[in-house]
Image (tube, grey):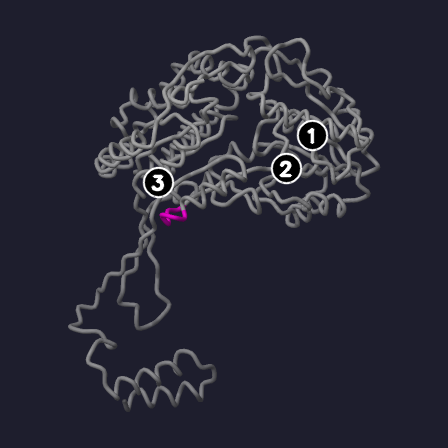
Amino acid sequence: MSAQIITIRNPATLQTIAELPVANPAEVAAAVARARIAQMIWQGTSFAERSRLLYRLRDLLLDEQEKLADVLTSETGKPRAEVYGNELFYLCDAIGVWAKKGSGFLRAEKIRPHFLLLKAKKVVTIYSPRGVVGIISPWNFPLTLTLGEALPALMAGNAVIIKPSELTPLSAIFGAELAFQAGFPENLLQIVVGYGETGEALIDHADMIAFTGSVETGKRVMRRAAERLIPVSLELGGKDAMIVLKDADLERAAGACVWGALMNAGQVCTSIERVYVEAPVYQQFVDKVVEKVRAMRQGPSDDEVDIGSMTSEEQLSKVEAQVAEAVARGAKALVGGRRNPRYQGYYYEPTVLIDVDPSMSVMKEETFGPIIPILKVKDADEAVRFANDSRYGLSGAIFSRSPTEAWRLAERTQSGSLCINDSLVNFIIPDAPMGGTKDSGFGYRHGAEGIRKFCQQKTVVIDRSSRKEEFPWFPASAKKTRQIRHLLVLLCRSGWSHKLRALKGLIKG
C-alpha cells in the first residue's frame, strides 16, 4: 500500500474494491477554507430551506437504496437487511426529526431575571452555528456515523467536513454526493480520506470536532483540540451490561440479548457485551440463548443471513484473543468460539460463553465482536455491582416484570442511557439524548443537546428603561456606596427587622 493511497477491501471476500488518494494536511486546510466560504452563505438560509433540502436528501436516499446497499455491504461485510433496517431506516427517521424539530431546539429563549432592579432588562439566549464542524467517524456504521452525525450540524447552519474510517470511506463519499444532488451548496459537506494525520489536520483547522471511536484515540483527539481550545464531543467505547432478573420474561430477554449482542456482528458501541442472570433462571436463560444463536445464519451479505463478517482483521484477532484467554481460564464456549471455516473473509462464529469470571478480559475490556458471555449472580444487587464495576458507562439493559424493581436498578446503574425490557433501541430514537459517562465519553447526540452542541450559545441583554444612566455607573460616591450596602441587606438577609432597617436606610440614602 502506498503512503498516498488507501486500498479498500471487502472484508467478506478480501477483494480490493477501491483505491483512494489520501488527503494530506495542506489539502485538509484547503477543504476547511472552502467550507468557511460555503458556511457563510449557508448560515443565512432559513430553517425552512434547510428542512426542504433535508427532505430532498431523504428522497434521494430512498431512490438510491439499492446502490447504497451495494456500497455499504461491500466495505463492511454486514448483511444487506441490516443496511435497510438499521442504517437507512435510522437516517430517514433522523432526517424527519431534525427537519421538523431542529428549528424549535434552536429557538431563542427568553430569561426572566429574578433581581427586581433588572426587570427592565430583556434577556435572550440564542444559538449560532460554530462554523466548520469536523466529524471523525469509525467503521462500524459508515453512513449513520458520518452523514447521520452531519445532519444536525448542517441543520444548525454549519459546514461539515468528515474524516471517515480508512476502512469504510465509500459510504460517506456516496452520502456527500447525494447531499450535493439534493441541492446543498458546493463545499458545504466534504469528505477527506486518510489516516491519523488527516484527522489531526482536521482538528488543527475546524471549529469543533465530533469524534466517535476508541477511548485511546478519543484522548488523543481531546489533547490536540485542547491546544486550540476548540470544543469536542466524544462517544467512545462501551462494555454494556444486561441484567436478567428471576421474574423476567425469559423468551423476550433471550431474544433481546441475541439481537443486542450480535447485530452487526457485535460491532456496535452499545452492544450487549456481558450478561448477568439471577441464579434461579440462569440455566433456562442460557438454554434459550444457545438455541437462538445456533439457529443464526452466517454468510455473505447477498445471501439471506442474520450475521455477516466482521470488518477488520485487527478486530477479529482481538475477539480471538479474548475468547482464547477466557477458555484457557475455564470458560466454556457452548456455541461458536472460532473463525468460521467455511469462508475466507473475516467471519467469526456467533459465540456463547459460560463459566466466565469478572476478571477475564472478555468481561472487562470492549470486545466489539459476536460474543455473549453470561455470568450467574445471586441477586439483583450483585448484578448491579458487577455492571457498575467497569471503566465504561455507555448503555445497558435490565429485564424484569416489576417496573418498580427495574426502575430502582436503572437509577443505580452507571450509564448514559438504559433500556428496560429492550436492547439497542435507545440509539434509534433521535428525539432522546444519547451519551456516555466514565470512559465512554461525554457530549450527546440526538435530542436538543444533539443539535445545540454544534452551536455557540450567546446571551443578549437589552435595556428597555430608556434611562439616561444606570445606578452603578460612574462617578462613584459615598451615597451610592451606602445605598448599595443597604440594598445588599434588603435583598440577602433574612428576617423582617433587618429588611425594615435596610429599607429605611435606603430611603434616607
Q: Nearer the viewer, mark 3 or mark 2?
A: 3
The amino acid on which the numbered mark 3 sits, given as a three-letter code, is Asp
Q: Position of residue 165 (x, y in %)?
A: 46, 27
Q: Secondary structure at mark 3?
A: helix
Q: Position of residue 303 (x, y in %)?
A: 58, 8
Number of on-image labels:
3
Residue 240 numbered tag: 2
- Which kind of residue does numbered mark 2 sit on? Asp
Give, as a single range, the part of the protein colored magenta: 226-231
Residue on which the image places disc 1: 322
Q: Is residue 452 left or right of residue 411?
A: left
State the CA–CA distance, disc 2 to disc 1. Answer: 16 Å
Label 2 element class? strand
Q: Is residue 218 within the magenta segment?
A: no
Within the image, what quadrant is residue 119 found in?
bottom left
- The circle on residue 204 is 3
Q: Residue at x 54, y 43 (%)?
A: 436
